[in-house]
Image (cartoon, rainbow, N blue to C red):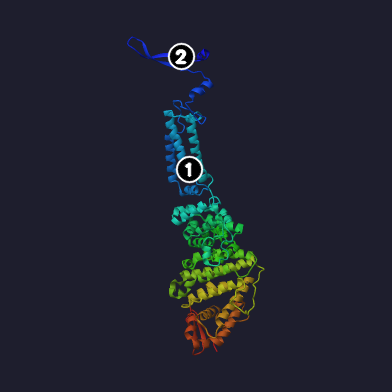
């Protein structure tokens, strides 16, 4: 007992003395040796559930992460997130787990930790002996806060999330919110962000979700037979088909459209619900003169983009994809009529160039069978010079009218299409070259479709009749000489000219009398071919002399009878330099006199 007391060291110090100098109260300072057994016995102020609770030492510790520092860091973090761009907020919102709610919980936990540490240690509250050090509390809170910031930076900057099965609902919901609000800045951001998710969206979407629908309503909603991820991918592909969102893609993120169509062609998934997106993307690319489609038209002026044509090849270069999307009238070549009416000659030329790319891939596939998608494209090109019926009213401004420019663009398309046939498929032949066809309304191959387009363009040119100069310029120089060039005798041109001559002759001779359309075409042919009989030795008229001989023979026997029955119809189709003289029963053609004293006049006698 006494030996153990020698371990203690005592020191008496008088605190209060009386008047006589006696010590009324003293202080006993005890120095305890560094013995583990004694320390554990003395420092444990309370035991609870086997845990030693003690009072923390009252000493000045370094401030690693106090409450004041936490409030400053949290304020700075909130300001940075508030002024951050929509791209960062969008990436945080589409993380596969609830990052924002989890961050709020962790932030509250960190704040409670540092606040408790700043209060408990100065007041020496009881706490477990192992945690009775403020450095542990502050370092733990600082580590969790740093991890939270790094997590946000990882998902917001270093490794942004993409569309997947884990975040499909969040991703689609955020896209719906942005497109629904219609803010231009947010939609531009989303247009760029979708490029990284294009591959996953196409892979996770169902390839048979809209194939051959029974009704129009079926491809406007999400099929119930799809899985959860497929339903979200289906909804997302329908969402991005909004016209105003497609307008933002064309103006600021054409790479997104390239990514979607390239992935569809690579994966050969042609029946995902992207038909609305394809149609609107193509329409907006044509309407926007500054789109990538216009920068790819000419390789001599556009550099590498003109040679590679990334946008045009991705959107229009896969005929199988275009034709599959065309089953729902949603191919890139199926442009709505309301948008076609706003086209000018430049925009029509862009459309024809896109059609040529599809036609080239169609020919590379090795077939000349009729293509429904290309047939609708030819119909669009045929209807483009719809303003030709007003050409005579424009008078002096007729040469500068947009209708003539559109007609020229359509003629150039035919020439480029025939050139592509000669280059890509030189050995292919049309299905039928018979003069007699039992059903001439059935298109047998691509040659029949092109011949029908040529015939319609000739019909459009026949509206120019008021002045001889205008009629000759449009009918012969713009159209006829381009189709019946005697120096171009390729196999494709030979087949097309044969079919066009047949269509012209059938239109004129189909009924006993002429109607307004057939009268215009007959007047155009008499104007461009002339009314002089054909000489067999004249090789310059070889490509169209057969048609001329046939029409002159028909006119000699039938035209006067048609004029006697309906003179207004016949005269409405003849140009200004052609008239019928009923007294002498002949056609009179008057040429411009130029420097001659009298104009040259040619007659053709009728029976």
Sequence order check, earlier mark of 1 and 2: 2
> Do the residues bearing badges 1 and 2 touch, measured as CB atoms within 8 Å?
no
Q: Mark 1: few, some, or many residues within 10 Å (few <14, many ≥20)? A: some
Circle 1 — which element? Answer: helix
- Indicate the quadrant where residue 59 lies: top left
Q: Position of residue 6 (x, y in %)?
A: 51, 13
Foreground residue among 582 and 324:
324
Query: Label 2 belongs to which residue?
Result: 10
In which quadrant will I find the C terminus?
bottom right
The mark closer to the camera, 1 or 2, is 2
The answer to whether any part of residue 309 appears in the image is: no
Circle 2 — which element? Answer: strand
- Indicate the quadrant where residue 547 lies: bottom right
The answer to whether any part of residue 451 appears in the image is: yes
Label placed on residue 451: none
Q: Position of residue 164 (x, y in %)?
A: 55, 51
Q: Position of residue 458 (x, y in %)?
A: 53, 75
Query: Label 1 belongs to which residue?
Result: 103
Q: Residue furthest front?
A: 1
Please state if 45 lies on the left or on the right of 508 as rendered: left
Looking at the image, is 606 positioned above or below residue 172?
below
Q: Mark 2: few, some, or many residues within 10 Å (few <14, many ≥20)? A: few
Q: CA distance from mark 1 to mark 2?
A: 55 Å
- Indicate the quadrant where residue 25 lies: top left
Q: How many marks?
A: 2
């Amino acid at each position: 007992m006494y030996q153990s007391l020698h371990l203690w060291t005592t020191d008496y110090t008088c605190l209060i003395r009386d008047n006589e100098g006696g010590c009324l109260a003293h202080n006993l300072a005890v120095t305890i040796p560094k013995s583990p057994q004694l320390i554990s016995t003395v420092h444990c102020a309370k035991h609870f559930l086997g845990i030693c609770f003690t009072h923390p030492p009252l000493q000045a510790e370094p401030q690693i992460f106090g409450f004041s520092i936490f409030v400053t860091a949290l304020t700075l973090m909130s300001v940075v997130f508030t002024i951050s761009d929509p791209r960062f907020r969008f990436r945080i919102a589409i993380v596969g787990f609830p990052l924002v709610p989890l961050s709020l919980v962790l932030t509250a936990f960190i704040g409670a930790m540092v606040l408790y540490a700043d209060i408990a240690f100065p007041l020496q509250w009881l706490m477990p002996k192992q945690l009775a050090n403020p450095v542990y509390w502050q370092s733990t809170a600082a580590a969790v806060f740093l991890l939270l910031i790094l997590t946000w930076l990882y998902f917001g900057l270093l490794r942004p999330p993409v569309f997947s099965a884990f975040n499909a609902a969040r991703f689609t919901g955020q896209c719906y919110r942005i497109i629904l609000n219609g803010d231009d800045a947010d939609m531009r951001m989303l247009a760029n962000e979708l490029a990284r998710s294009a591959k996953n969206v196409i892979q996770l979407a169902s390839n048979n979700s809209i194939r051959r629908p029974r009704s129009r309503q079926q491809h406007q909603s999400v099929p119930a037979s799809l899985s959860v991820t497929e339903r979200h991918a289906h909804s997302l592909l329908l969402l991005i088909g909004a016209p105003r969102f497609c307008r933002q893609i064309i103006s600021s993120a054409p790479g997104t459209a390239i990514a979607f169509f390239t992935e569809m062609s690579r994966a050969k998934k042609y029946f995902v619900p992207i038909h609305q997106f394809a149609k609107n993307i193509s329409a907006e690319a044509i309407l926007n003169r500054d789109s990538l489609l216009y920068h790819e038209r000419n390789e001599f002026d556009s550099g590498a983009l003109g040679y590679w044509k990334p946008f045009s090849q991705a959107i229009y270069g896969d005929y199988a994809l275009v034709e599959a999307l065309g089953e729902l009238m949603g191919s890139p070549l199926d442009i709505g009529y309301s948008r076609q009416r706003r086209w000018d000659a430049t925009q029509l030329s862009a459309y024809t160039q896109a059609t040529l790319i599809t036609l080239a891939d169609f020919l590379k596939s090795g077939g000349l069978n009729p293509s429904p998608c290309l047939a609708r494209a030819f119909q669009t090109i045929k209807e483009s010079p719809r303003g030709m019926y007003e050409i005579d009213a424009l008078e002096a401004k007729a040469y500068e009218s947009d209708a003539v420019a559109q007609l020229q663009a359509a003629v150039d398309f035919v020439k480029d299409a025939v050139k592509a046939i000669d280059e890509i498929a030189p050995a292919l032949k049309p299905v039928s070259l018979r003069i007699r066809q039992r059903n001439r309304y059935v298109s047998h191959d691509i040659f029949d479709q092109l011949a029908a387009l040529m015939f319609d363009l000739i019909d459009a040119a026949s509206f120019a009749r008021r002045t001889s100069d205008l009629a000759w310029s449009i009918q012969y120089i713009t159209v006829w000489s381009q189709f019946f060039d005697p120096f171009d005798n390729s196999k494709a041109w030979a087949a097309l000219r044969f079919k066009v001559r047949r269509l012209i002759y059938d239109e004129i001779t189909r009924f006993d009398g002429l109607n307004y359309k057939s009268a215009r075409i007959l007047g155009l042919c008499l104007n461009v071919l002339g009314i002089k009989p054909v000489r067999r030795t004249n090789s310059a008229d070889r490509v169209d002399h057969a048609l001329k001989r046939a029409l002159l023979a028909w006119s000699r026997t039938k035209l006067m009878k048609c004029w006697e029955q309906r003179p207004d119809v016949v005269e409405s189709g003849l140009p200004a330099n052609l008239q019928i003289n009923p007294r002498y029963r002949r056609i009179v053609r008057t040429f411009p006199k130029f420097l001659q004293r009298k104009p040259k006049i040619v007659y053709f006698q009728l029976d």
